[in-house]
Image (cartoon, helix red, strand yellow):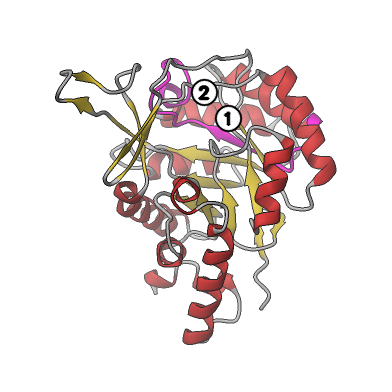
Amino acid sequence: MNMRIKFAGMTFQNPFVLASGILGVSASLLKRVETAGAGAVTTKTVTRKPRSGYRNPVVVELEYGLLNAIGLSNPGVEEFSKEVAEAKKILSIPLIASVTGSSGGEMVELATAMEAAGADAVELNLSCPHVKGHGLELGHDPGVVREVVSAVKSMVKIPVLVKLSPSLPSLVPIAEKAVEAGADGVVAVNTIRAMAIDVDFRRPVLTSVYGGLSGPALHPIAVRCVYEVYEALGDVPIIGVGGVITWRDAVELMLAGARAVGVGTGIMYRGLEIFRELRKGLEAYMEKYGFTTPEELVGAAHK
């Protein structure tokens, strides 16, 4: 069965995309994800200068998902550009480079560097919930989002995607401004700001206090966000992300309006085999209900 989809001018081998923050740190790991069956990959978010991130513990497993605050640890754009260039030599699927900065100017610098390194698209992370001065501070203001996206679009030729936060009352105003400014697609959603307290030590579990919650607890929120954005913006391509553990989770996001589905925490639970499991489940679902292409599922819950 042909599972290819078109997304913002790119061709994905199937709808399943490695989400940012999971295994996207090196060319060799990205190749492993491709071999495992992903249709496209997204890198870890890169910043202008190197970041060491927060002190351990930075991840805690809860009964309903993962709470993490890595702190955007990365080698900085200069070193990471080399990794992206190396990845492009060995990958046959699209590579989306995730970037974040503290200003529109930094976003432009990062996006142009990723384009020069060979990235097929750039994802503007305007929604990191736990690093002060990056992401969410820019992404909560529709006017600022419009300015940032417009500035980046004026400087790069590759598709520009905007990653949205579920912490906002509504994603629609942000998504609308991003698309008005020329965004080629949106990614919905990032993790949601949360925390956990150790009741024996009577203190926050994470050294950063706050982190981003992912996994099953995030999934129904992601479905709602994707549904709202699709309902408001129609044909704008959406990568739905949040708590995709089984093929049913993926299909649910597609029916809500996602053209592609990001996989992150699910890899922690099920390993890289999850990509083949998701494809197998989607194919069986399509055969059962008479769908001939994955794109026929997109937004079907609205009809």
Determine whether the residue tagged by mark 1 lies in a helix, strand or loop: loop
Of labels 2 and 1, earlier in sequence is 1
118 magenta-colored: yes
Front position in the image: 35 or 11: 35
Mark 1 Cα-neighbour bin, 10 Å: few <14, some 14–19, many ≥20: many
Determine whether the residue tagged by mark 2 lies in a helix, strand or loop: loop
Q: Is residue 287 left or right of residue 203?
A: right
> Looking at the picture, which amino acid does disc 1 mark?
Thr
Q: CA distance from mark 2 to mark 1?
A: 7 Å
267 magenta-colored: no
User: Residue 45 got which mark?
Assistant: 1
Front position in the image: 134 or 157: 134
Residue range of the region highlighted in magenta in the rendering: 116-138
Q: Quadrant of residue 9?
A: bottom right
Mark 2 Cα-neighbour bin, 10 Å: few <14, some 14–19, many ≥20: many
Front position in the image: 144 or 197: 197
> Looking at the picture, which amino acid does disc 2 mark?
Leu
User: Residue 72 got which mark?
Assistant: 2
Please state, as top left, top right, bottom left or bottom right, where the N terminus lies in the image: bottom right
